[in-house]
Image: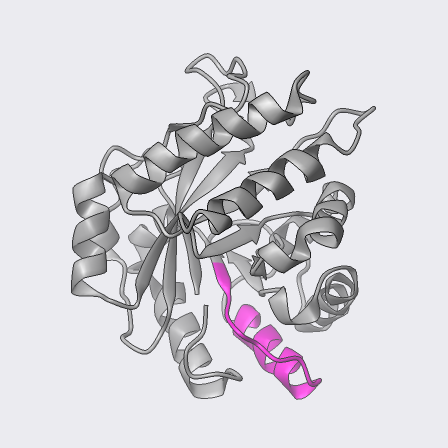
C-alpha cells in the first residue's frame, strides 16, 4: 500500500496511521523538490519540503516498530507555496542527473528512505525527451548503487505522455504506477473500471495501483471499495492501492487506510501487497 503524507504542512505523524502487520506499507513523504523556497529551479538539487513532524527519527522509529514499513520521497508535486512547479529541460542533462543523485543520496541516507516516487505534474509545451532520460537514468543509478529498492511514478490524465515515454524506456527500473485516478473525476465503479482498464494498457497492467483521494476529487466513500471489488470481478489483479493522503485522513480517524488494508488482505491477489 502507498500513502502520501506531509504535503500540506499539517503536523501529521507517521505513528498515527494504522498499519497492519501483513501489509507492505509505503509512506511517501511529500515532497522533495529541486527548487529553493521561492520555487526557483535548482538544477537537480533536491530539498525536503514535507511536514516538519516527518523527521529522520520519526521515519526510523516507525520502521523499527513496523518492519513491514518502507519510506519513500515523492519528487516535485504540483506546487511549492503559491509557486506552481514544472519540469524544465536542463541545459546539461548529465549535470542534472549528477546533482539529483548526490542530493537524493543525502536525503535517502538521512531520512532512512527506501525509494522514490516521481510526481512532476506540469511540462513545457515544447518538451523533449529530457524528462524520460534524466529521471530514468536517475532511478537506474539509485538502484544500481543500492540506494533504493523501489521506484514509482505518479502520472495523471494530462501528464500520461511523458510518463508513458519514461516507462517505455526505463520500465524495468519502475516498480509501480501510482496513477492519480481521482483526477479523472470518476464518480461510479463502472467508470472507474473503464479508465483503469485503459491505463493498464498504457502501462504494465500489474504495476498500476487503484488510487483514492480522501475528501477530494473522483469517486468518494465506499464506492471506492465497490470499484475495487468490480475490478477483481472483471479479472484485474489488485496488488495494492494508493491513498492521497494521510494529511486529509487524520480528521476521519484513517477510515480509508483501515478499510483499504482490510480489502487487500481479504481480497487481493497476494497476501503481501504494496
Kindly identify the residue that appears in the image at 56 percent across and 39 percent down: 138
Q: What segment is highlighted magenta in the picture?
A: 223-242
Please state if 125 lies on the left or on the right of 58 as rendered: right
Q: How many marks?
A: 0
Q: Which is nearer the eye, 112 or 123?
A: 112
Q: Does the image show residue 85?
A: no
- Magenta stretch holds residue 225: yes
- Magenta stretch holds residue 24: no
Residue 29 horizontal/vertical position (percent) = 38, 44
Q: Which is nearer the eye, 68 or 80?
A: 68
Please state if 256 lies on the left or on the right of 18 as rendered: right
Residue 193 horizontal/vertical position (percent) = 71, 71
Q: Which is nearer the eye, 249 or 204?
A: 204
Residue 197 horizontal/vertical position (percent) = 75, 69
Please state if 218 lies on the left or on the right of 11 as rendered: right
Kindly identify the residue that appears in the image at 67 percent across and 31 percent down: 122
Q: Residue furthest right?
A: 126
Residue 56 horizontal/vertical position (percent) = 22, 41
Above or below for 157 versus 240: above
Above or below for 12 versus 188: above
User: Quadrant of residue 259 in the image?
Assistant: bottom left
Kindly identify the residue that appears in the image at 41 percent across and 15 percent down: 37
Q: Does the image show residue 131?
A: yes
Q: Residue furthest front?
A: 145
Kindly identify the residue that appears in the image at 66 percent across and 80 percent down: 236
Q: In the rendered view of the protein, which quadrant contains the N terminus?
A: bottom left
User: What colour-coding does the image apply?
Assistant: one colour
Amino acid at each position: 500500500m502507498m500513502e502520501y503524507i506531509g504535503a500540506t504542512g499539517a503536523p501529521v505523524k507517521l505513528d498515527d496511521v494504522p498499519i497492519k502487520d501483513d501489509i507492505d506499507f509505503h509512506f511517501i513523504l511529500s515532497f522533495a523538490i529541486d527548487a529553493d523556497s521561492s520555487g526557483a529551479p535548482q538544477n537537480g538539487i533536491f530539498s525536503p519540503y514535507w511536514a516538519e513532524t516527518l523527521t529522520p527519527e520519526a521515519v526510523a522509529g516507525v520502521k523499527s516498530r513496523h518492519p513491514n514499513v518502507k519510506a519513500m520521497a515523492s519528487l516535485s508535486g504540483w506546487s511549492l507555496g503559491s509557486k506552481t512547479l514544472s519540469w524544465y529541460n536542463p541545459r546539461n542533462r548529465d549535470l542534472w542527473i549528477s546533482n539529483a543523485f548526490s542530493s537524493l543520496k543525502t536525503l535517502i541516507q538521512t531520512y532512512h528512505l527506501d525509494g522514490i516516487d516521481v510526481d512532476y505534474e506540469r511540462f513545457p509545451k515544447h518538451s523533449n525527451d529530457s524528462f524520460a532520460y534524466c529521471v530514468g537514468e536517475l532511478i537506474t543509478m539509485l538502484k544500481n548503487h543500492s540506494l533504493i529498492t523501489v521506484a514509482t511514478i505518479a502520472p495523471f490524465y494530462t501528464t500520461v505522455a511523458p510518463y508513458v515515454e519514461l516507462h517505455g524506456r526505463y520500465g524495468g527500473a519502475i516498480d509501480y504506477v501510482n496513477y492519480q485516478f481521482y483526477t479523472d473525476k470518476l464518480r461510479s465503479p463502472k467508470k472507474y473500471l473503464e479508465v483503469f482498464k485503459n491505463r493498464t494498457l498504457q502501462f504494465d497492467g500489474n504495476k498500476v495501483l487503484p488510487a483514492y483521494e480522501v475528501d477530494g476529487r473522483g469517486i468518494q466513500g465506499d464506492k471506492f471499495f465497490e470499484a475495487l471489488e468490480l475490478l477483481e470481478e472483471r479479472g484485474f489483479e489488485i496488488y495494492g492501492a494508493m491513498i492521497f493522503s494521510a494529511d486529509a485522513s487524520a480528521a476521519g480517524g484513517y477510515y480509508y487506510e483501515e478499510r483499504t488494508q482490510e480489502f487487500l488482505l481479504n481480497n487481493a491477489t497476494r497476501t503481501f501487497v504494496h
